[in-house]
Amino acid sequence: MEFKNFSLFINQTKVNRFAEDLANGKITSTVCKHCGTQYYPPRADCSSCMQSEMEWKELPTQGNLLTFTRIHVPPEHFAVRQPLMPFSSVQFEPCPIGIIEVGKGLPIMGWIPKMDIKKIKVGMRMKASPFVLPDGKITIVLEPV
Ligand SMILES: [Zn+2]
């Protein structure tokens, strides 16, 4: 899997392994071999000490929800395609999105696709998992544990 298959439209990156790991069910970070700073999303270059020797490390997947909101116009590949002519062939379903904190204060952002937004509470325990969309792109989803 290439990074362009992550749910963002990015073609060039030095952290392509991130998408490969997601495809294999792992959410990974990078850790600077010189100063120990950990990065999520992974970075190839350390902004603390300006070195580029990084080690890949799998992140824990469970954490407490820090915050959430609802996206009313998500990226098109999340939308449901229907014959809604003459207005649009795409129907957007508002979807909650949240950030959980794992490890040493590392935030993981993900979609919360299967929950009523009224049942989502800051501080609730959630699990982050890679998820392959119908178009083959991969993203991260959060669900309660
Ligand atoms: Zn460093």
Image: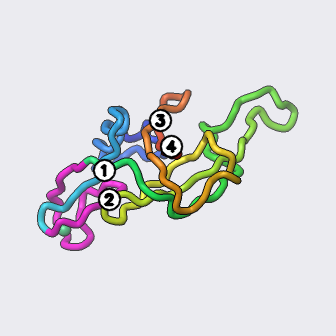
Residue contact at pointers 4 and 3, CB within 8 angstroms: yes
Identify the residue under disc 1. 59
Residue at mark 1 to residue at mark 3: CA–CA distance: 16 Å
Q: Earlier in the sequence, mark 3 or mark 2?
A: 2
Q: Residue at x 51, y 63 (%)?
A: 66
Comparing 84 with 142, the one in front is 142
Position of residue 56 measured from the top left corner of the image (x, y, whole percent): 21, 49
Magenta span dominant secondary structure: loop
- Range of magenta residues: 35-57
Q: Is residue 13 above or below residue 66?
A: above
49 horizontally vs 90: left or right: left
Identify the residue under disc 4. 141
Comparing 41 with 145, the one in front is 145
Which amino acid type is marked by label 4? Val
Residue at mark 4 to residue at mark 3: CA–CA distance: 6 Å
Q: Residue at x 43, y 36 (%)?
A: 5
Name the secondary structure under disc 1. Answer: loop
Which amino acid type is marked by label 2? Gly
Name the secondary structure under disc 3. Answer: strand
